[in-house]
Amino acid sequence: MDVKPAAGAATEPQPGPWAPPGAPGPYGPYAPPPPRPLARRLLVPLGTLGAVAAAFAYVGTVDPNEPGHYPVCPMLRFTGLYCPGCGGLRSAHAVVHGELGTALGANALAVIGYGVFAVVMAVWLIRAVRGVPMRLSVSPVLWWGIGAVLAVFTVVRNLPFGSALAP
């Protein structure tokens, strides 16, 4: 038997798309919203990958070993010391051309960074395809560790015994 509320009786309001999470609605009180379409989930990771690929394509085309194409590192220019990024463009150019030894010689830390970026991008794309959000939370200890590695790398590559790390 179908029972309809009497005229003027209060009915439970149905939340719209602006309702906060957990509000009662057609999917239950705590059910997740329906997944976004695959194309929309892949938009940001593929856009990021496309921008990085375009940058690598540019560096692969315009040789940083020839003077005049890129600005000089300000730290190297004014202090004569190599910063942690010095040699990064030459390293990227060598990676694009498949010369891993040359890339490691130009900036080994940058090559490690390219590898870490590739792994993070692969995880991000897999999670986007599966509909699982990507959340990176880096603890302060890890940030301090990264800073310490950069500082040690910078100091060692500027000392005589660390000249193998200099570009």
Image: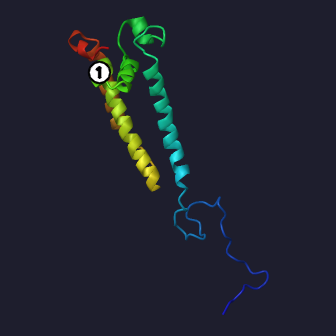
Residue at horizontal 75 percent and vertical 81 percent from the top: 9
Give above or below for 73 relative to 9.
above
Along the viewing direction, whichever of 72 and 101 lies nearer the viewer: 101
* Horizontal side, residue 40 vs residue 121: left or right: right
Quarter of the figure that contains the C terminus: top left
Residue at horizontal 44 percent and vertical 8 percent from the top: 67
Q: Position of residue 162 (x, y in %)?
A: 23, 14
Residue at horizontal 52 percent and vertical 63 percent from the top: 32
On the image, which quarter does residue 75 sit in?
top left
Say what amino acid the circle numbered 1 marks: Phe
Along the viewing direction, whichever of 134 and 145 lies nearer the viewer: 134
Quarter of the figure that contains the N terminus: bottom right
Along the viewing direction, whichever of 29 and 10 lies nearer the viewer: 29
* Residue 135 seen by the camera: no
Mark 1: which secondary structure? helix
Q: Position of residue 152 (x, y in %)?
A: 28, 21
Q: What residue does disc 1 label?
A: 153
